[in-house]
Image (cartoon, rainbow, N blue to C red):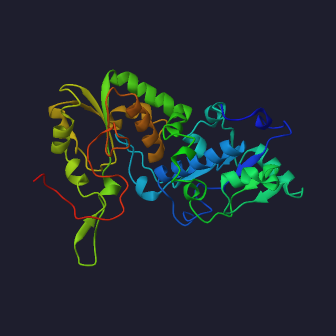
């Protein structure tokens, strides 16, 4: 799809590599803490785009860190607790499937990478450290273009900031939908089983939890990033909002990070509500952290007849709130519709 013949397969004599570090966003400002999966996927897409542009095999970290606040609960419907702070990247993504689309990917624990790294260290200019150069500058430099390994670990910023021109929309080569379709095989199969049981269904993603944070400003007034979100994601508000989009009696799959048990029960007055907790027999054997559960939820949402997001991502999206997802300032929360 994107990769030319000269970078196909190990052992061809022409395989060249792009290495960004042993952890997504590290090196970078996220070394001391761990970014959420959304930020990590933005960075991963960015690095993969650079691999496409440079026609190189991307060396993916073999593990991905899991931010604690996103993994501090149990799998719904079970007594299994989650306390892991990292996950094998191959437990989230299918690297063979990813490579089949034209972006060849290996992990930093693979024999191929270990052998190539050892070889590069013994040859002058075979391993080139890069910092502060754009992908265009790298591709136009003979020193970099001929190197066996381009090493990006000198970067001081998060990956998605360092390697992507976010102001140039035409520079985006991989859509947001790319990584969700690259989910690990066992996660895709779990999502397919859930979809089969649901039959003809609609779905809704309700993000609460972490995004409802409220803090006091210098004058002691409470402020939040999303002033209407708490109000707009109350069950009563949801019923009013989606009534024109989802007909009474429809099966509605709800994916949410809401912690309160029974929070969405009022939706049952109009719809047949389902969530991950209804499929513990499918999810229990394969889900070991919240990142895996999120990926399965995302796949289930993608198969729905009607999909409702929390925030509007694109102009034609259906959303629970009109608050902007990208905000620059905190505002006073609004809890009424007056």
Q: Nearer the viewer, residue 4 or 205?
A: 4
Q: Is residue 252 left or right of residue 282?
A: left
- Where, by quadrant of the figure, is residue 2 drawn? top right
Q: Quadrant of the C terminus?
A: bottom left
Residue positioned most to the bottom: 219
Relative to residue 52, is residue 186 depicted above or below? above
Q: Is residue 205 left or right of residue 137?
A: left
Q: Is residue 80 above or below residue 331?
A: above
Q: Residue 159's quadrant in the figure?
A: bottom right
- Using the rendered view, name the quadrant where residue 68 is placed: bottom left
Q: Give the residue furthest to the left.
A: 338
Q: In this view of the protein, which residue sits in the foreground, 114 or 74?
A: 114
Question: Residue 45 location, x and y as percent?
Answer: 56, 46
Q: Quick check: 234 above or below 247?
A: below
Q: What residue is at 59 percent from the left and 45 percent from the top?
A: 89
Where is residue 50? Give x, y as percent. Answer: 65, 47
Residue 42 in percent (x, y) is at 52, 49
Residue 63, visible in the rendered structure: yes
Residue 11 located left or right of residue 1: right
Question: If the image is split into quadrants, where does the N terminus sit?
Answer: top right
265 relative to 152, above or below = above
Using the rendered image of the protein, determine whether residue 289 is visible from the camera's viewpoint. no
Question: What x and y, as percent, mark residue 34?
Answer: 51, 60
Residue drawn where x is 57% and y is 39% of the image: 93
Numbered marks: total: 0
The residue that appears at 52% across and 53% down in the rendered structure is: 166
């Amino acid at each position: 799809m994107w990769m030319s013949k000269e970078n196909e397969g190990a052992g061809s004599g022409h395989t060249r590599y792009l290495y960004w570090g042993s952890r997504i966003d590290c090196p970078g400002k996220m070394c001391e803490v761990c970014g959420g999966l959304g930020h990590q996927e933005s960075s991963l897409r960015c690095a993969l785009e650079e691999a496409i542009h440079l026609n190189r095999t991307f060396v993916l970290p073999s593990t991905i860190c899991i931010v604690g606040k996103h993994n501090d609960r149990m799998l719904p419907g079970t007594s299994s607790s989650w306390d892991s702070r990292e996950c094998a990247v191959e437990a989230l993504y299918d690297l063979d499937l990813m490579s089949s689309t034209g972006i060849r990917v290996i992990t930093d624990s693979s024999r191929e990478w270990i052998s190539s790294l050892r070889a590069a260290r013994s040859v002058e200019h075979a391993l080139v450290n890069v910092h502060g150069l754009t992908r265009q500058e790298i591709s136009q430099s003979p020193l970099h273009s001929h190197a066996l390994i381009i090493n990006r670990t000198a970067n001081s910023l998060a990956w998605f900031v360092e390697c992507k021109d976010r102001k140039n929309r035409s520079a985006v080569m991989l859509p947001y939908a790319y990584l969700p379709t690259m989910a690990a095989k066992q996660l895709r199969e779990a999502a397919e089983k859930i979809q089969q049981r649901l039959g003809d269904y609609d779905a809704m993603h309700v993000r609460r939890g972490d995004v409802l944070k409220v803090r006091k400003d210098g004058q002691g007034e409470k402020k939040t990033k999303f002033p209407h979100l708490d109000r707009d994601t109350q069950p009563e508000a949801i019923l009013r909002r989606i009534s024109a989009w989802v007909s009474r009696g429809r099966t509605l799959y709800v994916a949410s990070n809401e912690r309160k048990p029974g929070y969405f029960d009022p939706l049952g007055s109009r719809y047949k509500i389902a969530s991950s907790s209804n499929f513990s027999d499918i999810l229990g054997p394969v889900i070991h952290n919240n990142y895996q559960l999120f990926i399965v939820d995302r796949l289930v949402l993608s198969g729905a007849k009607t999909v409702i997001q929390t925030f509007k991502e694109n102009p034609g999206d259906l959303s629970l709130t009109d608050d902007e997802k990208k905000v620059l300032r905190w505002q006073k929360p609004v809890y009424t519709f007056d």
